[in-house]
Image (tube, helix red, strand yellow):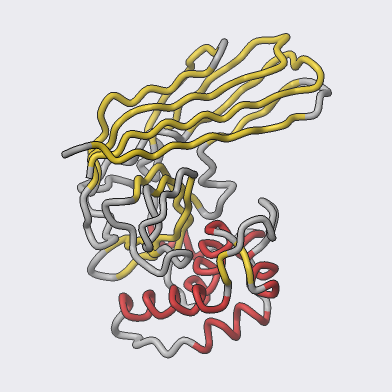
Amino acid sequence: MKLRISHETVYGYDKPIRNLVQSLRLTPSVFEGQKTHEWTIDVTGGMKGPCFRDGTGDWIEGWTVRGPVEEVSVRISGRVDTRDTAGVLRGHREVIHPMTYLRDTAPTRVDDGLKNLAAEVDGNADDGLDTAHKLSSAVAGAIRYVSGVTKVSTTAAEALALGEGVCQDHAHALIAIARLRMMPARYVSGYLHSTIDGDSHDAAHAWAEIFIDGLGWVGFDAANSCCPDERYVRLGSGLDAQDAAPIRGVAMGTGEEKMGVRVQVEELPQ
């Protein structure tokens, strides 16, 4: 599938800021399932700094904006050719050991509800892939996809107790219960062209990856009850949503920040 992606994030401040430093994880991953073309990143008034590929295999760009400034836009555009690898992250080079992803964080910390959910899954100890699929199905059944009911700061335990949430909540919950079963799991940020029902999905997306012995990292999107296929574009990964955030930064000033996001994912003719 050939996908054209445009993504703009606009930061507005009610008082001019003196300086802005950002770390951008906005370049598609390099692996067998996708190939990137014509990819550009632009920060209005920004100066591009150090760029490097980190231990997880993600490409990181540093940008600085010198003020005073009241608005900053981060614009991304480009084309990605994708193909279905059944969710398996083949050909992705990284040096972080999978066991690192057994460590929990605040958003993925377990409570009794998550422990009970993990215990309900009757997985085969000798078949990690089957267990991972069942864990993903359990999360999909326990948390109904409803937008606007949770916040960026909502934890997996809170979303499970609510019984509703968005892709971030599904990913955090799946990561939490996979780690309970001693299966390394991590958060993945990216884009999705359409849902499993074919509805357009012009927004950033997130899912989980679980490490399976003999296969490596395999993606599971509990929000859509599937593994990532050619409709997905992978950007980067981390222990949780904050760790894998496409944009991280620090603004120097006293003004309040407002953020607006526009994403368009378009399929191009073959």
Residue 34 placement, left or right of 235: left
Q: Where is the C terminus found, in terms of image quarters?
A: top left
The quadrant holding residue 264 is top left
- Please name the residue shown 61% across and 22% down the image: 21
The quadrant holding residue 65 is top right
Q: Nearer the viewer, residue 198 or 81?
A: 198
Q: Nearer the viewer, residue 183 or 190?
A: 190
The quadrant holding residue 260 is top right
Q: Nearer the viewer, residue 247 or 163?
A: 163
Residue 25 appears at what percent x and percent y? Answer: 46, 35
| Residue 169 against residue 262 in the figure, above or below | below
Residue 19 appears at what percent x and percent y? Answer: 69, 16
Residue 29 placement, left or right of 121: left
Residue 160 appears at what percent x and percent y? Answer: 64, 73
| Residue 119 against residue 199 in the figure, above or below | below
- Please name the residue shown 51% across and 89% down the image: 120
- Please name the residue shown 49% across and 79% down the image: 138
- Please name the residue shown 66% across and 70% down the image: 157
Q: Where is the N terminus found, in terms of image quarters?
A: top left
Residue 266 appears at what percent x and percent y? Answer: 34, 38
How many marks the image carries: the answer is 0
